[in-house]
Amino acid sequence: MRVRVGRGVFGRRGFFVCLYNSLHLVFGLALFCCGSLHQPFRRVVTTMIASLMPNNIYEHLAARVLGQEAALRAISVAIYKHINHIGGARILMIGNSGTGKTTIMQAIEEFYAAHESLAEFRAMTIMNARTLLDEAGDVDTFAVFRSLENRVAAMLGEKRAPRDVQVLMENATVCLDEIDKISGKIAGKSDVTGMRLQQALLTFIEGERFLYRARVHAQGAERYAKLPINTRNILFVCGGAFEELYDQVYARVDNKEDERRLKEVRVYDKTSGMKSTILFTLRDYLKMSDLFYYGMAPQFLSRFGSIAMLDDLGRETLQRILLHSKDSPFNQSRTYFKTMDIDLRITDEAVDLVVSQAADNTRLGARALREVFSRVIMDLEFDPFDSGALRDGENGTRVLEIDAGMVDAALQSWEE
């Protein structure tokens, strides 16, 4: 049998192939126009994603995160791999408290939100690694899926198609904070719970297909559906302070158990002048065996494509955070005082004192900066009008200027 269509003549097989392709095109365009996340024709979106190079991603992250250039480059490459479905997009961040791990995680989320072409990658959750234990103490990796499902529900609303839920969950970013807290050692002794958590995360992070019972909207009603979720394309960003690791590696190098030696240099400090100091950073001396000894299983660490070392924040970076960052404690206080028609200012000498005090506490980083500034400003925020520090400014404004004497007095009372 032959079917005549217009001027062309097709066999039965050719007719149905033509019909299938036509319906496929119409169906694909309909899905595209309806805004579905899963469409056969995504050339425009794919082109937009392809235009995002690692350096473009870095520029966005660096505008939000001050310092940590080397770590941001590694993370930018991991994100590029993720949005292009290239394997190995898993990264481990190591850095002291206050070096910016949480800020980086938030910056990643803001990056996805800033680009319409990355809509299917916007499902993201930030979790504490220890929350993967349930009340009975059993490992519950599906807690990751539940957290992602809640995020997807907030994104799609009530009418969420099963396929859209699946696509968002499979292309999600999962940030596990305090990953060092699932170490297989506590105080030098084996921790069975930590090892169980690492083992449970092995296949989950590497890529495995799971059946997950999710809430979806299908056949005109809210219902549960078992969705096959493949974790292969999920970007895992894990971070931890690894607090004892610094001393552990320093002791190894200091005891000459390493071919490299500690370097003593002379540096200039504005407050104390020239002084001798030992240059030591984990970036320069860390070995993979140090992490094994710390309690991280070799099989677990091998799942990460790269390790990003976050440096302790130097004085210049701390000053930029104090005055210019999105979460600048000084600018937040300026906004606070503006509600009272007060113009808050700070002298260069006062900035140097605040930054110097925060820099001395390298284990707290930006958190130390916020704590020091809070000590200086807290009494002024409570009652600036009775502080004796207000003066008349230009155009009838009232000015409150923080000087070095005020910082010094606040820090002395703090130490007492």
Image: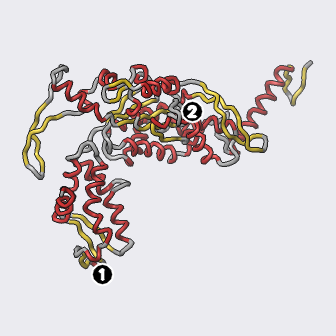
Of badges 1 and 2, the one in the foreground is 2
Kindly identify which residue carries mark 2: 142
Question: In the image shown, does 207 or 121 lie closer to the viewer?
Answer: 207
Q: At label 2, which amino acid type do we have? A: Phe
**176 lies left or right of 98:** right
Rendering coords of residue 132 (x, y %): 50, 34
Of residues 33 and 391, the one nearer the viewer is 391
Image disc number at residue 396: 1
| Above or below for 326 versus 345 | above
| Secondary structure under the numbered disc 1 in the rendered image | helix
Query: Is 182 displayed left or right of 249 in the figure?
Result: right
The residue most toward the front is 136
Residue at the outermost bottom position? 396
Crowd band around label 1 with a 10 angstrom C-alpha radius: few (<14), some (14–19), many (20+): few
Dot 2 alpha-carbon crowd within 10 angstroms: few under 14, some 14 to 19, many 20 or more = few
Distance from the alpha carbon under mark 1 to that under mark 2: 60 Å
- Whether residue 110 is situated above or below residue 190 in the rendered picture: below
Residue, far right: 1
Is residue 231 something one can see in this rendering? yes
- Asked if 111 appears above or below 385 in the picture, the reply is above
20 horizontally vs 365: left or right = right
Q: Is residue 225 left or right of residue 326?
A: right
Can see residue 70? Answer: no
The structure's colour scheme is: secondary structure
Q: Residue at x 47, y 44 (%)?
A: 111
Which amino acid, by three-letter code, is at mark 1?
Answer: Gly
What kind of element bears circle 2?
Answer: helix
